Each structure stands twice: as structure tokens, then as C-alpha cells.
Image: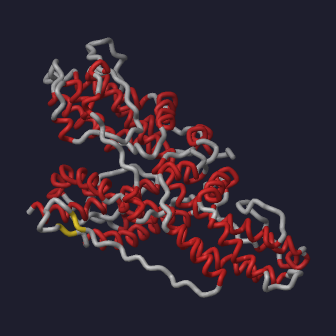
Amino acid sequence: MAKSMNIHLLTEASNVIGLTELRLILGFTPSVPWNHRQRQSKEELVSSTSIKDYYELKEPILVLHGPEYEFLLEKHLKPAIAFIDKRFPSIRIIYRGFLAESIRTCKGEIDRNAVDFMIEEYYRIYQRVRKAVDEVRFDNNCPSRLIVTPLAVSTAPSTDNQTALFIDKELAKISTTCLSGRDHEEITGNILKDEMARTFNVFLGIEAVDVIGLMELRSILGFSPSVPMKNFKKLSLEELKAATIEEYYEAKEPISYRHNKYGWKLEKNLPPAIAFLDNRLPGIRNVYRKHLEEQIGRLPERIDRTGLDFMIKQYHIINSLVAKKTRVLWAETEECLKKRTKKDPLNVESIDDNLFVFRNTNSTTPSPIDINEELSKISATCLPSQYYEQLSGDKLIGWYADWYNANLLYNAHMAIGFEEMRKALGFDFSVEWTNGCGPNRTDVDAAPTIEKYYELSESWNRVSDLDTEMFFEKQLLSGIEFLDKQVPAVRKIYRQKFEEIRRRPDAKQIVDRETIDMMFEEYYLFQGDISNAMYSLRKNKKCWEGTS
């Protein structure tokens, strides 16, 4: 029975991971997909008032959905997802990489057509992931272990000319390279942490590989270095006829679509990425150079427009080959996933009891607020675009900055909730928010004191709920500071909710394990209201009208 149930849970957990990544890519807050109602009518879809409402109505429904499965999924789905993220992290990475690549075609505009397109894309990758998950089997001789069908890997045959052999050899080296989280951080110029950097580099890395090739093409043609990420003016047919040979090339050079208005500041993002690739994987540039040098040798000494067209075509030929072989750098192989550095588990014995200060919570509290009114105010708030630009920094703009800020503020308000829970229970200690190491449930249950039980309980929930591998500590702290300054009602709501719980007639004066468990349950019940209000705040851009 347990074996059969686990197969269903693994399937549903992998689906929810995909839906979570789809929501994050679209800038929506995480949800509980199994609580969805039945399919909505066409009239309800047409009358939906916001893009989020429209998405909610069209979000794919799980197989195990409805009231009869709600208890099962609420109780068991979370550990199933945690198991998959730990044992098969490639599932989340595959969803994230594929959907992040797909959303590029939306060019920063998320409307109903974009939502429909992204849901279709979700179904495309979902079918492939589902097929792989269905191949997971339990070994009867070892019930605690999972057997996974290995991926088949094939390589293209080499040709017999010297240049092709050189290219084949260099690309083979590249295709077996594994990049660490620290490598990905360096590619971004150390502005993004591990998982956030990996997502960003799905785009940035591909772009850097393309631009290295364009740099070599310009060098081979004898043209001055340029900035391939610029917006070039399209020439009319008459202008093209009158253009010099270099102007002709400028007009026909392959251009990136990742311009500033689509969320990219490539003049700032590309240099560290190119520098990393040149230092770590010089074969990329060497392959471009070797191929283009050979091809230009077939042309007359004086290159005309026909020769330029030929060389641009050759760039596309070698670029497609290089892009294919370097794709594994940005979408990890199973071998690379196995090589990821494992974090040391939290040493619960090393926790200093002196970190805890048990406080009397019967102190004077501020005047009570109307929580529903405060939530409405948050939802109706419009923060100037400059505030968000300061939050994400000057290297991220457009849809990617929106995605970064959405994740940062979501994690920040969750962190504020943990802080206020601590205070309400009378605990006072500091934590490292982005430390991904945490205890397991056994460690929590074995805690020798009530103080340590709370600390381990929070650590367990914090590591599970916060995206610890997406942000550096200073970035998450900046998110908390941003909310305290610009949206102070978030902290006020959390504080009042927890204090109200502690003042209930049936509340125990002495904090015990049952009280702590109850506080976490209450936290998860109302933090969703704050998430929804924060989502509305981020989508409110009325005050941006007329600004550049």
C-alpha cells in the first residue's frame, strides 16, 4: 500500500514542482494546486478581472485533486516534494530552465496570450518529466531505494578533416564540464547567488557563447570590436545599397533580442560572463576562431557582400554546433548533479543554549490595527518604479528584475513572519537566513529543551519554505529592510496576529511543544493573505504612468 501511494505522491509532487516554477516564472505567488475547483466556464474566464485571476482559472489541475484528497496532499505532499528536490533536483531545474527559456518569447509582457502560451509550454515539458517519473520503480529486494532508468547519451560522429577533428575534440571537453554554484555566481559578476544565478545564466550563458562567436567573426573580417547587444538601426533597401562594406555587415550582423527593454543590461551582464568562459573554457573561442579562419581562407582576399553573407552563414553553422554542446553548462546533466557539493547537515549539538533569551511577552503593545483594512491598503499601494530598481540593482531590468523582486519580497515577508513568531513566543536569537543547512524531523523531536525545540522547528520550516539558495544574506536582509521601510504594515500584521493568538483565553502561559506546533500551523494559515496582498502591490503600476 505504501509503495503504491508513494508512486502516486511522487507523480503529484513532480507536477506541483512544475506548477510552482510556472507560477514563479509568471511572477505569481506559490499556491496549493490541489485545492482548485473544477474547470471554469468560458464566461468566468472572460470576466476574470486580472491576469492572476485568469491564470488561477486556467492553471492545470492535478490528478489527485478535490476534497477527498486534500488531507492526503496537505499531509504528505510537502515531504514528497522535499524528497524529490533532494534526490532528483534535476526535475525542478528542468522545469525552471525550460519555462525560463519559453518565457523569453513573451518579451516581458504577461497578458492572457502569454499565460495561455506558458501553460501550453508547461504541458510540453510536463509530459516529458511525467514519462521519466513514471519510470521510477521500487526495487523489491531493497524497498527503501529507488531505481531510476539512466539517460542514454549519444555523440555525433567526427569527420576526418583536421579542423573538424579539432572542433570535435574541444567541444567534447566542454560537453563534459560541470559548473558549480560558485561558478554560476562568478558568471553573473557575483551579483546573484547559486540557484538564482543558475536561472539567470540559462539566458546569460547562451548569450555570452553567441557573442564570443560574433567577436571572432568581426576579428576575422577585420572590423572593429563592437557591442553586439546594441539595438541597431534597420537600414532601408536604398540605404543598404549605398552602405560601405562594414555598414553592410553592421546591418546584417546577427542581433540579440535580449535588449534592455526585454530585461537585459548586456553591456553590464556580459563582460563577467565572457571573461569567465574565456578563462575556464577557452575552447569555445578557439572553436569559433578555427572554423571561421578556415572558411575565410576559401574567399578572395578582398571580401565583398557575397563573401560577408557567406561568413555570416558560417557563423550560424558553427554557432549551432557550439550552442548544442554548451547547452549542458546551463541545463545540468545527471552526472553534474551528482557532483554538486553537498551541504553539511546542521550540527544540533553545537547550538549554544546561551543564544536563547526567554522573554515575558506581557509588554505594552501598540494600538490594535484592522488587519483586513491593512491588507486592503497593501493591495492598493503603488510603489514607484525607482524603488524596485534600487531593490534589484542596476544590472537587472525588465521581466527578470520583476521576477527577482517577486521572489525576494516573498522570501522577505516570510522571514518577517518568522521573526515576529519568535518575539511572540519570547525567544530572541539571530539566524543566518540563507544558510541552506537544517535539521530533520528526528532532530527536532529529539530537542532536549523547549528553546532548542523552537529553534530547530523554525530552522526546519525556514530551510523548507525560504529559497535559501537564491539569495545572498545581504540581499534577503535588504528585502526585509525594504518592506519595513516601504510596507511596514507587513510586520504590524504578523505581530498582531501572533500576539492575538498568545492572548487567547485557551492559550497556555508556559510555552510548550504543542504551543510551538500550533503557532507554525497558524502562521501558514494567514501568511497566504499577506502573500496575496503583496502580489497585488507588485502588480499595481498605476503610479508609473508618465515615468520613463
Query: Could one spot residue 44 in this view of the protein?
Result: no
Q: Quadrant of residue 136?
A: bottom left
- Residue sitting nearer the eye, 443 or 159: 159
Q: Residue at x 61, y 76 (%)?
A: 167
Query: Could one spot residue 296 in this view of the protein?
Result: yes
Is 416 situated left or right of 358 in this image?
right
Q: Is residue 304 above or below residue 481?
A: below
Is 228 situated left or right of 59 in this image?
right
State the scheme by which the image is colored.
Answer: secondary structure
Q: Quarter of the image containing the N terminus? A: bottom left
Where residue 494 sits in the image (x, y, percent)? 34, 30
Q: Is residue 407 above or below residue 48?
A: above
Where residue 507 sits in the image (x, y, percent)? 16, 23
Where residue 219 sits in the image (x, y, percent)? 79, 68
Where residue 120 sits in the image (x, y, percent)? 42, 70
Q: Residue at x 32, y 60 (%)?
A: 88
Question: Furthest-left residue in view?
Answer: 1
Q: Is residue 223 above or below residue 190?
A: below
Q: Residue at x 70, y 81 (%)?
A: 313
- Residue sitting nearer the eye, 89 or 488: 89
- Residue sitting nearer the eye, 522 or 547: 522
Total numbered labels = 0
Q: Is residue 525 above or below residue 236?
A: above
Is 100 situated left or right of 240 in this image?
left
